[in-house]
Amino acid sequence: MKRRFFTAAVALAFWGPFAKAEPLPKMQETPMFADLVKSGALPPVDKRIPRQPSIVTHFSGSDGPGHSGGQINMLITSARDTRLMTLYGNARLIVYDDQFKLQADILESYDVKDNREFTFHLRAGHRWSDGEPFTTEDFRFFWEDVANDKELSPGGPSVVLLVDGKPPRVEIIDERTIKYSWDAPNPNFIESQAQAAPLFLFRPAHYLKKFHKKYTPVEEIAKSGRGGQGTNWVQIYRRHDVMYNNDNPDLPSLNPWVLKTHPPAQRFVFERNPFYYRIDQNGVQLPYIDRVIFTVAAANLVPAKAGLGEADLQPRYLGMRDYTFLRKSAKSSGVEVRLWQAGSGSQLALYPNLNAKDEVWRKLNQDVRFRRALSLGIDRDELNEVVYAGLAHPSANTIMPRSPLFKPEYATTWATYDPKQANRLLDDIGLTRRNDLGFRVLSDGRQATVIVEHTGEDTEQADALSLIADHWKKIGIKMLFKPQSAENFRLRVFSGEAIMVAYAGFTTAVPTADTNPKEFAPTMQGGLQWSRWGMYVESKGKQGEKCDLQDACQLLDLVHDWAKSPDEAGRRAAWDKILQINMEEVFSIGTVNGILQPIVVSPKLHNVPKEGYWAWDPGGYIGLYKPDTFWLSQ
């Protein structure tokens, strides 16, 4: 089965329909560049864009096409936040639109055959931000000289590029066409290009060859190592090749805005990319906004500064705890405070450690009756009202209704408040004896005290856990919660020392059939309820423990079935079974989801959606809604 994808293939596509034969709109020169064009320092706009650019005809906000000019201010908390512009710009070979559908973006189109062969077609005349051509040489350089260079990539190509342990065949057809193929399906490949932190398959070869020993003598490279970077060519190369971190102003980019400030700094300036590949239907080259300014501020001051109007757009470092203050401040500052729905399977989830070292707790945690009892023992309606101001939705830790895979029972099964049934389940396990305090007694005579470890420093998480402790007391389970540093938290989970932990729920909250379901199975060390099983899978049996719980092991088989399925129907069938098992087995215990995220917006800024979806992936926070289409009133 062969499919061909074009940015113009579907009328609902984010950038709207076009075809090669369709004439482009008459281009309007960008005012910011008019003098440079007049002087000859820059070519005119119709020579800067690709011959077939990406044409925007759909805007996530309601204001439609705008005009060029102006700058907006945003607040960040450290110099590392320059990477946020990689998320917000959301320039990818393939992207999600605001309906979570995948489509070509940087690419003009792509072909998929049996999920084994992928042919990418670049846009003719597309250029990097410094004006150099963007061609398949940039892909060849990455594949041959980065991914397969034993010094730069000692572990070899990314696991996403391996199928049954084998890398792809990479064929450069011509300067605009490249083909990746495997002997078996690789359903992860296309989605890997659309993620918040994508697997970049290309690099600006013309720039980075200056730091690669294959093309430049190491003595010359060493001269670029000033500033504490050392003289090792690999270190120097890596410092310059920072496409995701976005903290090297000299690195050519395809993003809408390019960094102009060398770190460290307290203020970072991003300026529009003169060779950007998107235009609107009126012939205006995007982005509309000339400059984006990132100003560093202490995290605890961000809400106050945003509320006072010191940010034109502030999506990060705000929470519902700030909402009342922001609304009051908005009356005098004039900013608008919008609420978007946060994308997480659960705002706070509890993870019984199925790999706990303590044998008694390990046995209990692996008993589905125990996990169900704990879930039934939580009054989510009260939790929602008391901690989340009634603005969330009681739910198990599962996918959200926005997902086409969602079924209502995923959110409610074993996730309603039923202390009577919870008590019966605990009795059935054999936890019938209670001490003088009313708490159940374990098989070895200890009081049934669950210590829940967490990394949260905010009062919201502590308040939620405190309320859950009151709920569990009614079913004879004592709960204590203990904050840990992020490092200790991970170490204690990975080692099996932790009995139970509290953390955010599934990040894969709005999957489609083509989304990798690995987060819902013990496939990786980061799975908090089965870390050592995941470690075993990730290390190919060299570390951790082999899965020994039948239903959890079945999830691994289903992930394998999903990966090997040649069609969407097969992948959806695997997903349905995976979600069903997670629902029945309660491997993690959800509380509420659909929490609202405040977004502060200047009244002068247009096309920021009134309501939106706020998540790391898919979407890159505001990136899903294409900030290059936001514009300012004059």
Image (cartoon, grey):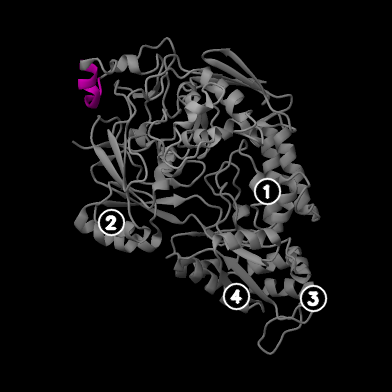
Whichever of callouts 2 and 1 sits on the residue coming sooner in the sequence is: 2
The local crowd at label 1, few if under 14, some if 14 to 19, many if 20 or more residues have their Cα within 10 Å, is some
Q: Which residues are magenta?
A: 29-38
- In the rendered image, residue 454, in percent from the top left (x then y), is placed at 56, 65
Whichever of callouts 3 and 2 sits on the residue coming sooner in the sequence is: 2
Residue identified by numbered label 4: 480
User: Per the image, is 30 magenta?
Assistant: yes
The residues tagged by marks 4 and 3 sit, at their Cα atoms, a distance apart of: 22 Å
Q: Amino acid at mark 4?
A: Leu
Q: How many marks?
A: 4
Quadrant of res 497: bottom right
Residue identified by numbered label 3: 430
Whichever of callouts 2 and 4 sits on the residue coming sooner in the sequence is: 2
Q: Which mark is residue 524?
A: 1
**Helix, strand or loop under label 1:** loop
Specify whether 72 is left or right of 526.
left
Q: Which mark is residue 305?
A: 2
- In the rendered image, residue 118, in percent from the top left (x then y), is placed at 62, 22
The local crowd at label 4, few if under 14, some if 14 to 19, many if 20 or more residues have their Cα within 10 Å, is few
